[in-house]
Amino acid sequence: LIGMAFHASAEDWSSDLPEPWRSPEAVVAGQDGHTFYVAEKNARRAAKLEGEPAAVRFRVPFLGEPTGLALSMDDRVLYVTCSRPSEGLCAVDTGTMKQLYTLPAGAGACSPVLSRDGKTIIVCNRFENSVSQIDLNTKIEIHCFPVSREPIAAALTPDGKTLAVAHHLPA
């Protein structure tokens, strides 16, 4: 899919950027197995691909570079982390590809991870050396955990009790 998104025809993309410079940064699949979302870092947008063969159907622009994606359990909301702290976490309606809301997050927000119940989301704040937990109902950060250095990826264990965090640089 990334190769396909990376090499889509010029007619499929509305960007002034040459094809190789859109820089797919993250991809997430919908439950139907035929819908995919791609974060296009340098183009500063996310694309929705559908069908067989998959083709770009919608795009949503962001002020900052999208750095990560997470999809709600019902596939209705796409959560996008962005490089701008004021636009750190964006929620996008997957039906219309319109932004529902934007929340601030730490500098270099990336790697969003939804909790198993879908009530909170965890975001790595790469350049603040922290990980935030945000309540999606109140849209407020409920915890900010310090980590040793530049968190860039995170994953929850299947029971939701342990968060593993990867770092770019050694501590």
Image: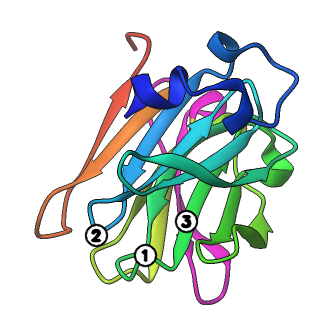
Q: Is residue 97 shown in magenta? A: no
Q: Position of residue 33 (x, y in %)?
A: 26, 60
For discs 2 and 1, the disc positioned in front in the rendered view: 2
The numbered dot on residue 75 is 1
Given contact means CB atoms under 8 Å apart, are the residues at marks 2 and 1 in contact? yes
* Disc 3 crowd, CA 10 A, few/some/many (<14, 14-19, 20+): many
Q: Which residues are magenta?
A: 126-149
Q: Position of residue 13 (x, y in %)?
A: 72, 35
Q: Is residue 121 above or below residue 113?
A: below
Residue at which label 2 appears: 32
Q: Position of residue 141 (x, y in %)?
A: 63, 69
Task: Look at the image and tell me in which quarter the C terminus lies.
Answer: top left
Tag 2, which secondary structure? Answer: loop
Tag 3, which secondary structure? Answer: strand
Given contact means CB atoms under 8 Å apart, are the residues at marks 3 and 2 in contact? no
Q: Is residue 18 above or below residue 45?
A: above
